């Protein structure tokens, strides 16, 4: 864990507030508000017998299902214990010593590099451009790959989160592919975290031809609503997949997770319903948040919204007040590259979002206390 931590720690909140999980509304992790596919839930309920065996270490069926889903070979997929396991495997498996990250972004990339003694450099999107990832700066003479540092090994990998968390910005697939080509030409690894990409399929490169050095990460946590099961996957050419797999502990992904992920992937109806709901509700919430006095809201391609509280409103206090009301939001004031007024809220059900809006309105009216 890094100093900034993660959203979604409902267990710690429940212990601290001495209330049951069901009395918390978690806007700090961005999970499909319609929940997992009903078919995935049925699969889990019926899968008790599988617990008497070790899980399939190759995740064969899920990889076959993903191969059909993305029209790729099953050998191009590696399933992980959440994409987090894969984020931690990559530096070791690919011997990445210096990672260039396009920020501000998810803290786990830096945490993974730190754990294996590696180094991280960043090119930062800026607020004035609504946090558009500055892909052109990756190759700028004085920045990114152009920067000459003597006390660190040369940059050997570039990471882009698309759509990005916590800013919500999605680069086009064409822009990502162009960056992939340029990065590959330099002989570097290119890592694309597409954990939220189900919400903006046009921005994804996962169904396209991947260069020999590109690795795409996806997850069943967010859109498929299965954070507690821990399933994610990497997509890359077969030799890279084999290399990463060689570093993975056996039986990382349990059988309920494998089966539920497969059922979720097949449930096209739930997927369509989830996307339709998100398109509508994100826009409604965004407009309402914009109307809160002194708040700034950034458009998002995913199922969360980055916003800034009014100038004199203290983020830590606001988060604490909401928490006492059982409402958890993500304090982003410490995320490198964001300002001290930044918070991220998930788009949840209409009723939950109204509860958040009501509570935020009251807290802002009182100035944070
Ligand atoms: C951008 C991003 N990538 C990856 C992850 C990890 O997801 P998981 O390990 O649940 O697949 C998260 C979780 O918050 C995330 O926000």
Image: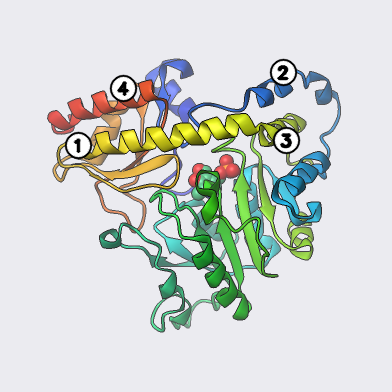
Kind of element beneath mark 4: helix
How busy is the neighbourhood of tag 3: few (under 14 within 10 Å), some, or many (20 plus)? many
Q: Are marks 4 and 2 in contact (CB under 8 Å)?
A: no
Kind of element beneath mark 1: loop
Instruction: Report whether the residue tagged 4 is closer than 8 Å to ligand 1.
Output: no
Horizontal arrangement in the rendering, residue 204 relative to residue 233 (left or right): left
Compute the Cα span from label 3 to label 4: 34 Å
Q: Earlier in the sequence, mark 2 or mark 3?
A: 2
Q: Which mark is residue 355?
A: 4
Q: Earlier in the sequence, mark 2 or mark 1?
A: 2
Q: Earlier in the sequence, mark 4 or mark 2?
A: 2
Q: Which mark is residue 291?
A: 1
Name the residue rendered at 59%, 67% in the picture: 190
Horizontal arrangement in the rendering, residue 121 relative to residue 322 (left or right): right
Horizontal arrangement in the rendering, residue 88 relative to residue 358 (left or right): right
Name the residue rendered at 76%, 42% in the picture: 65
Label 2, on which residue? 45
């Amino acid at each position: 864990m890094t100093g900034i931590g993660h959203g979604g720690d409902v267990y710690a909140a429940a212990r601290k507030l001495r209330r049951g999980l069901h009395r918390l509304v978690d806007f700090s992790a961005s999970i499909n508000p319609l929940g997992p596919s009903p078919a995935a839930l049925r699969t889990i309920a019926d899968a008790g017998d599988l617990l008497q065996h070790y899980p399939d270490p190759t995740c064969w069926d899920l990889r076959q299902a993903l191969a059909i889903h993305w029209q790729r070979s099953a050998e191009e997929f590696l399933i992980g214990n959440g994409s987090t396991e894969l984020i931690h495997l990559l530096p070791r498996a690919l011997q990445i010593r210096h990672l260039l990250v396009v920020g501000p972004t998810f803290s786990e990339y830096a945490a993974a590099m730190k754990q294996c003694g590696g180094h991280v450099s960043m090119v930062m999107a800026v607020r004035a451009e609504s946090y558009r990832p500055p892909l052109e700066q990756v190759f700028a003479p004085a920045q990114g790959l152009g920067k000459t540092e003597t006390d660190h090994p040369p940059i050997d990998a570039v990471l882009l989160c698309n759509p990005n968390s916590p800013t919500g910005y999605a680069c086009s697939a064409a822009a990502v592919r162009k960056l992939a080509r340029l990065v590959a030409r330099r002989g570097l690894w290119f890592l694309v975290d597409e954990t939220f990409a189900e919400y903006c399929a046009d921005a994804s490169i996962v169904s396209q031809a991947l260069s020999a050095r590109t690795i795409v990460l996806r997850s069943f946590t967010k859109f498929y609503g299965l954070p507690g099961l821990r399933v994610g996957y990497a997509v890359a050419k077969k030799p890279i997949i084999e290399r990463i797999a060689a570093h993975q502990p056996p039986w990382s992904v349990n059988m309920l997770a494998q089966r539920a992920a497969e059922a979720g992937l097949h449930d096209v109806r739930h997927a369509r319903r989830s996307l339709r709901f998100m398109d509508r509700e994100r826009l409604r919430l965004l407009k309402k948040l914009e109307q809160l006095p002194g708040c700034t809201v950034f458009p998002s391609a995913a199922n969360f919204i980055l916003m800034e509280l009014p100038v004199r409103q203290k983020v830590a206090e606001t988060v604490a007040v909401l928490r006492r009301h059982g409402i958890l939001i993500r304090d982003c004031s410490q995320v490198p590259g964001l300002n001290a007024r930044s918070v991220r809220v998930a788009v949840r059900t209409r009723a939950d979002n109204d509860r958040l809006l009501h509570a935020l309105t009251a807290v802002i009216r009182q100035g944070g206390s």
